[in-house]
Structure formats: structure tokens, C-alpha cells
Image: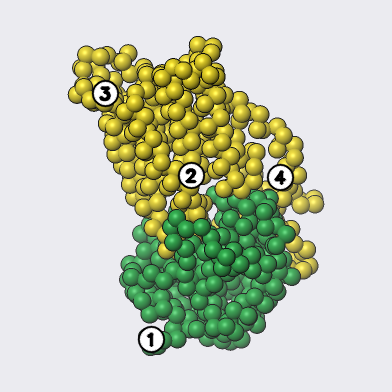
Chain colours: A yellow, B green
Amino acid sequence: MIEILSYPFMQRALIAALLTGLIAPAIGTYVVQRRLSLLGDGLGHVALAGVGLALLTGTAPIPIAVAACVAGAVVVEVLRQRGKATGDVGLAVLFYGGLAAGVFLSGISGVGAGGLAQYLFGSLTTVTRDDLILVGVLAIVILVTTLGLSPQLYAVATDEEFARTQGLRVRLYHIAVVTLAAVTVALAMRTVGLLLVSALMVVPVAAARNLVRGFTAALVCAIAIGVITAVGGAVGSFYIDAAPGAFIVLLAIAVFMLSWPLPYLLRRRRAAAVLPEVVDDDQLVAPHTITENHPHQHAPGCGHPAVQHGDHTDFIHEGHRHAAHADHYDEH
Amino acid sequence: MLLDASTVLAAEDLTVELGGLPVLRGVSLSVKVGEAVALIGGNGSGKSTLVRTVLGLLPYQRGAVRLFGSPLRSFRQWSRIGYVPQRSMALLGGSKVREVVAAGRLARRRPFRPLGPGDHEAIRDAIALVGLSEQLNADIAALSGGQQQRVLVARALAGEPDLLVLDEPTSGVDLEHQRVLAEVLAELLSKGTAVLVVLHDVGPLGDLIDRAVVLSDGRVAHDGPLGDLGQHHRQFGGHEHLDHGRTAADDQSEETDSWLGGAVEP
């Protein structure tokens, strides 16, 4: 460990890995909560267009990749908010357009598509001092936002309508989250690479949710897992001469795999409790209460969860149970 | 419509179309300080659409909404509103009960400021009121449906609102806790809080209701004391087809309801 710190390039590599491990799960928590786990992956493709442009113009790649990525993220979010991104076709066009533009631009710049490899898979040991300053400043912005605005971002990510009745500007918060995710993706292209950065936004979060209870605890735990795997992977890859980006992601997945079995065994009894409260039949409703008319025939796979109830099957419909009886449904 | 200082919610001649289909057709509704108004009607009658529209969650094509005297568009005093949506745990799983309820304080908090002592107290009190103090740190996904519903009520109560809007708050809740909710609401009403509640079954809340507004097919079919309604309305929330069979119009409105249920999910 002392030996590794004597190389300036490794000092920079470790700081870059540490910062990536901090910010990717911090913003990833909100991205995963909104079920946008693959957003980071798509934005990685868009960032590549920025890299291609930088290679063509001979400028520093990170700032241009950040700009391209943020622009792509905002376009995707605005399309989503206007309900135009359904079917994911718009997203796919944007993402593959980014990839194609990146390869195309790097080709005509004379570097060739091979020059993109260090951005696709990371190149931790070539991080420069200027890169580090930019990454450091943006990492502070991301951490201050994701931790300081945690109550607001939490509300917006978990219950958008309720957040609106609290006077929160929901659209603005959504744009902030995807913008910060885009910045994270672009910054992480040096450490784990554009193809793997999404893993560092998602996997530590998934592992943390298995290990601890509660949103805030999971946020903190995910950041801890991110830092440990990012720094551990960077150090480990130095000693076994492996690709740091891949090693970091494999370590994170190992933590995720380990996070599974124990809580599963501990919490198995929870599974039974997710059904709506079973109320004494004679307490809440008369023994034979006809339910409201129901627009479709309940059947396995109709979208309403089926529950075995004594000798027959009930279907859960908006918090109460429907049981077929002659030509109507009873409340059970 | 007469507007005076005691009117906290006033909707006039509201017309709402969703996906090109009319859901509300010229609905007017008002709630005064300390008044409890029940919204009753069958599936697809527009109850949820109405409460979501007056809270600014759905756009309306015609009419006007005023909250505490301000037009909805320029209304900013959101800390005066408490909203209990229909139970949907889609994205809340993984949160502790306390975290969910704490979100009810957001309208009173400034960004980048931690919860103050007053916030903590309001959150604790709200959870105690719905009888979930022992589940403070439980994962909301591990609770029963009725308990989850009570968490959503606590979240709205934590904001100490002047107008409480509840969308089927008794759905899946056992009779004992429906009575608890009735007591909580009675106390709030006595302090001047206004209550607008969508009800499927009137149940123990019936005694509190000052006025019942019955919606049918997007129009107000009745606006007056609950006692003026027939017995079956009290019990079944206005399911006319119980009396005279299923009609084509019923089928139509219910399909609209389930279709909307799918379309307006966030």
C-alpha cells in the first residue's frame, strides 16, 4: 500500500477511483428508485459522441463529454415528461446515435475507433491533474446535491404526486437528477469506462438495499460499498495487473451476490405480509356483500393478484378482494 | 358562487377530459373551514379525478379552482394542504415508515435544512395518531395493506394541514382503525381543519360528514346532508346498478375508470 502511493499516477488513480465510488452510487440511488437503472448505460453511449468530438477538435475529452451527456440526458427527460418517449424508441435512437457519432467522429479525426477503447473501458492510470480537478469540483456538486436535497429528491422519486402537493417543483428535480447522472457518467469514463459506469450506479445500490433497511441507510451504505469496491479494485488491479474498471465492477457484483442470501433468510417471513390486510369478514363487510360491477372477468394473469382463500381463489382489486359468485363478484 | 373567507376550496364548473374522454362535466364543489365533505359515487364517476384536479395534479379544460382564496395556478401555500392518495406502494417499498411520513413536512422545510425539533415532533405525533408507533422503523413494504394506508394518512397529518384531502382512506383498513381515523378527523374538524374525503363505503366516518356530494357520470347528482341519501348509497357508495341491474352506461363508465387508472399512473 505504501509502495503504490509512491507513484504519482497511482495517487491520481486512487483519488479518481474514490471520487467515482462516492458519486456513482449517490446519484444512482435516485436513478434506481425511479426504475431508470439502464439510463446510465444509454448516457454512456451519448458521452462517446462528446469524446469523438473532442478527438476531432483536439480538445480535452471530459468537458465535452460532460456537455454532450448532459444535453442527451435533458432531451431524454423532457421527452419522457411530455410522454413522447414511450416504447423506448426515442431513447434507443438517441443512444445509438451517440455511439455511432462517437465512432464516426473519432474515425475522421484520424484516431480511429480504437482510440475510444480507453473511454469505453476506463484508463485509470492516465488520469491527469486537470482531469482530477474537474472531477473533484463536480463530485462536490453531486454530493452536496444528492445528500443535501435528499428529502426532496426522495419524495420526488418515490411519490411524484404527493411531492407536487408539497409544492415541490417535480420536473425541475427530475431534470436535476438526470443531469447529475449524466455528469457522473461522463466523469466515470476515465475510471471504470463508459460501458461499465452504469454498473457502479446500480449494483452498490442494489446490494445496499439487501443489507440495510430504509432509504437513507441504503443511500449511505451504497456509497460505502461504492468507495470500498472502487478503491479496492484500483489497488487490486495494480498488484495483479488487471483492468481496473472491470475489476471494480466485478468486486461490486461480488458484494451484491453476498448481500443476497443472509437477508433473504432473515426476511423470508416478510413475503407473506405484503398482501392487503385480511379483515374479519363479519367485521368489515356483511358475509355476502356484492362488489361493484367489475369491467372484466378475473382470471389468472388478468393483472389482479390471485390469492387462495379457503376453497376458492380471490382476486385483489384496489385493496379489497373479489371472489367470483354466480354472475357477480363478492367482497371477501 | 359565493366566496367568503371561510371557503378553503372552491371549484366551479370544472370540465376535465382525459385522453379525449370527458370525465368531469361541469362539476362545482366547495369546502369551508371546519367542514367535512364526502365525495361519493360509483367507479368511474370521477371522484378521484375531481380531488386530483383541485390539487393541481391533473389539468382541467374549463372552470376555475381556488384554494384558500388563491387561483390554483398561483397557489403557493402548500403546507396548508394534506393529501392522502389512493394507496399505491409502487415506489415506496424500501422506505421506513418514518421516512415516508417525514415527506409530509416538506412543504414546511427549506432545501438543505435538516429536520428541526418541531418536525420530529409532528412526525412522531402523526405516526402515534394512526397507531403505528411500534412500526416506526419498519419497511413499509412489510406492512399490511391497512397499515400502509394508515402510513399515508400519517404522512398527510404530519404536515398539520388546514385542508385534508383523502382519497378512499378506509380502503383495506379494518373497522377498529376506521373508528380511530374517525376520531382523529373529528378532532381536526373541531380545530377548524376542513376535510374532503372520497369514500367508497361511508362506514364509521359517516357520523362526521356534514355534506355529501354524489358524483354520477362526471356530474353532481346530489349535494346535501348525508341523511338525505338512500340507505344503499350510505353503504355502497352509490352503486345504482345494485338496484336496477347493469346497464350499458355502467359498463361504459367502468371501462373508462379502469382505462384511466392505467393511463394516469405516474
Q: Residues within 10 Å of mark 3 (few under 14, many from 20)?
A: many
Amino acid type for the residue under numbered disc 4: Ala
Check disc 2 and report the residue beneath it: A30
Q: Earlier in the sequence, mark 4 or mark 3?
A: 3
Q: Are marks 4 and 3 in contact (CB under 8 Å)?
A: no
Q: Is residue B194 above or below residue A241?
A: below
Placement of A78 over or under B221, stated as above or below: above
Q: Which mark is residue B63?
A: none
Camera-side mark, 2 or 1: 2
- The numbered mark, 2 or 3, whose residue comes first in the sequence reads 2
For the residues marked 2 and 1, what is the alpha-carbon distance in whole angstroms?
43 Å
Name the residue carrying label 3. Answer: A52
Query: Are discs 4 and 3 located on one and the same chain?
Result: yes
Mark 3 → mark 1, Cα distance in angstroms: 63 Å
Q: Residue at x 57, y 27 (%)?
A: A253
Q: Residue at x 54, y 49 (%)?
A: B91
Task: Say what amino acid the circle numbered 1 marks.
Answer: Leu
User: What chain letter is assigned to the residue under label 4?
Assistant: A
Q: Is residue B10 above or below residue A281?
A: below
* Residue holding disc 4: A271
Return the x and y of residue B215 as percentages of the image width and height.
50, 74
Query: Are labels 2 and 3 on one chain?
Result: yes
- The residue tagged with tag 1: helix, strand or loop? loop
- Which amino acid type corresponds to the residue marked 3 in the rendered image? Gly
Nearer to us of marks 4 and 3 is: 3
